[in-house]
Image: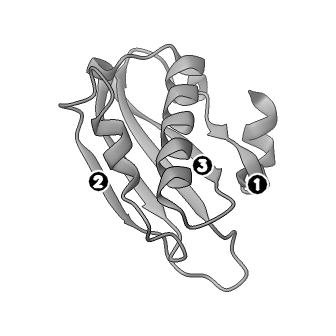
């Protein structure tokens, strides 16, 4: 069994707690669904937000989901690069699996499709 990374990103319209929390759950649920994984398969999730999102910790909404209480979550700030996508939440889900890295399905939602149109289209 190996640890594989699954990338994901989603954008929100505004720096509002509800939008950040709802978008985080949407992104997580989509990653889990398209990859057929369960919380117990996940070694941890690294979450970053752009510096314009400070109304909520995205991990808060995930910790409240049934079965996700023990999944390690870490939030941090994305590197501020001039001209980069704004109001973006990014995930790096580390999953224990027998699948190859090429079999992992990455998820880009909303304006985040612009980050990796090649991977977003593969879904």
User: Which residue is drawn at the image coordinates 79% and 55% (left, top)?
Assistant: 114
Mark found first going from the N terminus, 3 or 2: 3
x, y (%) of residue 113? 76, 49
Is residue 84 rendered to the left or right of residue 65?
right
Which corner quadrant holds the N terminus? top left
Say which residue appears at 56% left-offset and 35% top-offset. Answer: 26
The answer for how far apart the CA atoms under marks 2 and 1 are is 23 Å
Q: Secondary structure at mark 1?
A: helix
- Asked whether, in this view, residue 94 is left or right of residue 120, the answer is left
Q: Quadrant of residue 69?
A: top left
Of the numbered discs 2 and 1, the one sitting upstream in the chain is: 2
Q: Are marks 1 and 3 in contact (CB under 8 Å)?
A: no
Quarter of the image for the C terminus: give it: top right
Report how many numbered discs are placed on residues in the image.
Answer: 3
**Residue 72 is drawn in which quadrant?**
top left
Residues at marks 1 and 3, CA–CA distance in whole angstroms: 9 Å
Query: Callout 2 environment at 10 Å: few (<14), some (14 to 19), or many (20+)?
Result: some
Secondary structure under badge 3?
Answer: strand
Please give the residue where the numbered disc 1 appears in the rendered image: 111
Asked whether 80 or 97 is in front, the reply is 80
Q: Residue 115 location in percent, x, y? A: 72, 56
In this rendering, the answer to whether 1 lies above or below 18 is above
Kindly identify which residue carries mark 2.
74
Q: How is the image coloured?
A: one colour
Q: What residue is disc 3 on?
A: 9
The percent coordinates of residue 20 (x first, y second) are: 51, 54
Q: Identify which residue, 86 or 96, lies in the foreground.
A: 86
The answer to whether the residues at label 2 and label 1 have Cβ atoms under 8 Å apart is no
Q: Residue at x 81, y 35 (%)?
A: 121
**Of helix, strand and loop, which one carries label 2?**
strand
């Amino acid at each position: 069994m190996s640890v594989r990374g699954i990338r994901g990103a989603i954008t929100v319209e505004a720096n509002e707690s509800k939008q950040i929390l709802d978008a985080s759950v949407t992104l997580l649920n989509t990653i889990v669904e398209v990859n057929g994984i369960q919380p117990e398969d996940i070694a941890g999730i690294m979450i970053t937000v752009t510096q314009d999102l400070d109304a909520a910790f995205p991990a808060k909404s995930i910790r409240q989901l049934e079965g996700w209480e023990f999944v390690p979550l870490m939030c941090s700030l994305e590197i501020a690069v001039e001209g980069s996508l704004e109001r973006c939440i990014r995930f790096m889900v580390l999953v224990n699996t027998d699948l190859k890295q090429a079999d992992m399905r990455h998820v880009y939602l909303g304006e985040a499709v612009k980050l990796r149109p090649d991977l977003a289209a593969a879904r």
